[in-house]
Amino acid sequence: MFFLYTLAGSMLTFAGVLYFGWKSSTYFHVFTLELDKLYQLAALGVLSTTSNGGSSSLSSPGSHQGPALPAAYLAALAQHRGPDGRLRDPRRPCWLKSAPTASSGSACDAPAGDDRLGPVRRLARRRRHHLRRIAAWGAKRRQEARRLLVRIPPRLLPARHVQPENGGPSPVRCST
Amino acid sequence: MGRGSDARLGAGISVLTLAFALAACWLFFEEQSVGDGGAKAQGRLALGVGLVERHQWLGGRDGDSRIQVQYLLGVDAISLSLLMLTTFPHAAGHLGQLHRRWRTSSRVLRPDAPPPGRDEGRLLAQDLLLFYVFFEFTLIPLYFLIGVWGGPHAISR
């Protein structure tokens, strides 16, 4: 199996080499694998697999070089930004989406008092992973979950090495 | 050929490779400093690919051939540092084989199993297909390392 894995990896690498040669032949009209020419192709964006072609996949938004990005792409980037330029979650409550204003009577008025963050808290609690919710199950079910999730290696821990859990009953001491 | 002869031959080849690498290092900086006199006059050294050796490998020798794969070797600053980092441990390992106490039955360090210069060629290749060939040569000692010494299902120890 080790030989087969090595052979498969070599074949994949050779396929990648042939792909670079094919890309260079489409640009230089010669099948060449010289690294200097491949660097030129990479600088020109020919080796890039993105649809816009001219931009490298490693380029950051601030250092974009090449043809202009499509308007839909830029609109999708700006979609989650509010008028103040901050990143916003579109699923947040409406009174948290916009900056607080003195206007009142609209549908997005924030509820008064401590209930202002109540829906946000409930939303966060609902999205929390189920394994992190065991704290709300109570002590008994939490202990059961810990027995299920925490695997103790067999025959590595003798009984005298098992420490009681925090808050659990005191260990039974043998007088012998 | 006994293990002692193997060790002496391996040490000789590795020390010779190290000497070539040191000579390449000196020649590279000489060539770069001569070739870019303006940069040297400004107190900086513009390092490009130097010591280029170019031969036609695959495809026709004329310019009309559609395949131009070359045996192209060269050294730049990064590959030069990696070359030194490769040749020094090789020479140290082979010289350590000369001592009977440190001698092992390693097939990697024996000169008959792998062709010498595989790692150096991988670092100096300036053609992707040539790099691939040298890279495949480096898998041979890796095969012995993993297959013979690696894991509980090793072939022998």
Image: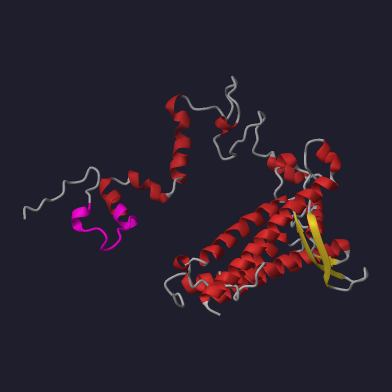
Q: Is residue B149 left or right of residue A26?
A: left
Residue B77, percent across and down? 72, 50
| Above or below A85: residue B49 | below
Which x, y percent locates residue A127?
Answer: 47, 45
The residue stretch that appears in magenta: A146-162
Q: Is residue A123 left or right of residue B77?
A: left
The relative height of residue B38 versus residue A52 in the rendered view (above or below) is above
| Quadrant of the frame with the N terminus of chain B | bottom right
Instruction: Choose between A17 and B9: the one closer to the eye.
Output: B9
Image check: A45 left or right of B101? right
**Residue A24, image x and y in percent?**
82, 63
- B157 relative to A35, above or below: below
Residue B155: percent from left, percent from top = 46, 78
Residue at left offset 47%, top offset 36%: A119
In percent of the image, x 72 and y 53: which residue is there? B25
Nearest the viewer among B38 and B57 is B38
Residue occupying the far left of the picture: A176
Q: Is residue A35 magenta?
A: no
For the C terminus of chain B, which image quadrant? bottom left
